[in-house]
């Protein structure tokens, strides 16, 4: 008995000593919460820095490689006379086009117009695309009858129907929006319809057992189940709407010029630095639009869809 009490006393002293010398604060790393990892404040900061580096460094590396290839083509493959016309170096594009307000201002005004055209066209394409997919999902004969027309919108040459678009909707803002809708609508139709058809058959059986109506099945099962596919189509359509705005600028030159109109003008006048600056602006706008809708997808369906896939 004396030996037992002595062991307990020694164990208590060791426990107190360990508590005094143990780290004061540890917390669970948000990224490693599922695995139960604990990190101190400094370690958590280092982990955040590593995650930031993994996100930023690949982008910076791609930009550096792109600029290196641009410089190599400009200085190593072209003579000075051809360089000024074909591929001006990036520093000249920066100093002679982007940093000159007289050159940059018309590009920004044209970009603002393209933003308006592409966003209006995207909204219309999303609404019409989802509505068409919902209609086609209600009966097989509707899908067989309407889907070929959706494919026709995807493959029709825009140049061939430009006169009709101009006559029906005018050659200004409305005509450009129509071009955006024609180019961007098919991914919304195809992805929404695919998502509706991909809903689990067991879930449909459960709704049938509970005698759900067609609208209850659509609102509470088909549409929520199709959200990941719908947002995938939205990402594709957002990029296509930017292309549609530029294509509309090429074909409809009445009214305020867009970036596509300026690109055509710079090509005809051989203004290479302005041409490259306009190309960079339009490309940057496309990347920003795609990134914004990718982030929206992650916020809207990323967490629950990821957990659902992990449970399968």
Image (tube, rainbow, N blue to C red):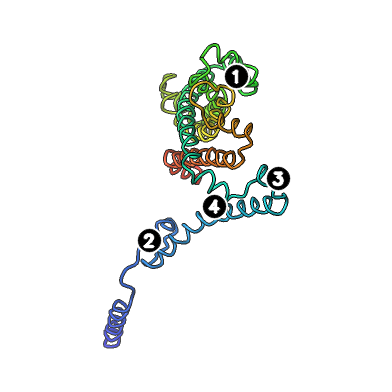
Distance CA(mark 1)–CA(mark 4): 39 Å
Mark 3 or mark 2: which comes first in sequence? 2
Distance CA(mark 1)–CA(mark 3): 49 Å
> Is residue 30 rendered to the left or right of residue 288?
left
Q: Which mark is residue 189?
A: none
Q: Please, what secondary structure does the residue beneath circle 4 have?
A: helix
Q: Please, what secondary structure does the residue beneath circle 1 have?
A: helix
Q: Nearer the viewer, residue 116 or 21?
A: 116
- Relative to 169, does residue 36 appear above or below in the rendering? below
Neighbour tally class for label 1: few under 14, some 14-19, many 20 plus, Cα within 10 Å: some
In percent of width and height, residue 160 lies at 65, 17
Mark 2 or mark 4: which comes first in sequence? 2
Residue indicated by mark 1 = 147
Residue indicated by mark 2 = 28
Distance CA(mark 3)–CA(mark 4): 30 Å
In percent of width and height, residue 271 lies at 60, 38
Between disc 1 and disc 3, the foreground one is 3
Residue indicated by mark 4 = 59
Between disc 2 and disc 4, the foreground one is 4
Mark 2 or mark 1: which comes first in sequence? 2
Between disc 2 and disc 1, the foreground one is 1
**Which quadrant of the figure contains the N terminus?**
bottom left
- Relative to 217, does residue 61 appear above or below in the rendering? below
Between disc 1 and disc 4, the foreground one is 4
Mark 3 or mark 4: which comes first in sequence? 4
- Relative to 161, does residue 76 appear above or below in the rendering? below
Neighbour tally class for label 2: few under 14, some 14-19, many 20 plus, Cα within 10 Å: some
- Relative to 16, does residue 116 appear above or below in the rendering? above
């Amino acid at each position: 008995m004396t030996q037992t009490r002595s062991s307990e006393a020694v164990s208590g002293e060791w426990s107190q000593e360990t508590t005094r010398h143990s780290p004061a604060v540890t917390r669970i790393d948000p990224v490693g919460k599922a695995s139960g990892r604990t990190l101190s404040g400094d370690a958590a900061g280092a982990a955040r820095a590593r995650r930031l580096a993994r996100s930023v460094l690949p982008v910076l590396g791609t930009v550096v490689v792109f600029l290196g290839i641009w410089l190599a083509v400009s200085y190593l493959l072209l003579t000075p006379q051809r360089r000024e016309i074909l591929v001006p170096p990036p520093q000249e594009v920066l100093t002679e086009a982007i940093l000159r307000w007289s050159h940059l201002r018309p590009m920004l005004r044209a970009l603002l117009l393209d933003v308006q055209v592409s966003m209006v066209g995207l909204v219309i394409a999303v609404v019409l695309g989802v509505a068409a997919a919902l209609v086609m999902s209600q009966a097989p004969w509707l899908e067989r009858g309407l889907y070929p027309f959706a494919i026709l919108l995807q493959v029709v040459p825009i140049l061939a129907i430009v006169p009709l678009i101009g006559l029906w909707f005018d050659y200004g803002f409305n005509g450009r929006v129509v071009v955006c809708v024609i180019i961007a609508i098919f991914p919304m139709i195809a992805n929404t319809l695919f998502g509706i058809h991909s809903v689990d058959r067991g879930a449909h059986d459960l709704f049938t057992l509970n005698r759900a109506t067609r609208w209850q099945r659509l609102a509470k099962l088909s549409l929520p189940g199709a959200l990941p596919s719908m947002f995938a189509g939205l990402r594709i359509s957002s990029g296509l709407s930017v292309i549609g705005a530029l294509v509309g600028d090429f074909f409809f030159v009445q009214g305020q010029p867009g970036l596509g109109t300026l690109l055509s003008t710079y090509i005809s006048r051989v203004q290479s630095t302005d041409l490259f600056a306009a190309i960079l602006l339009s490309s940057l706008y496309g990347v920003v639009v795609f990134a914004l809708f990718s982030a929206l997808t992650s916020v809207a369906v990323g967490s629950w869809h990821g957990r659902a896939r992990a449970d399968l």
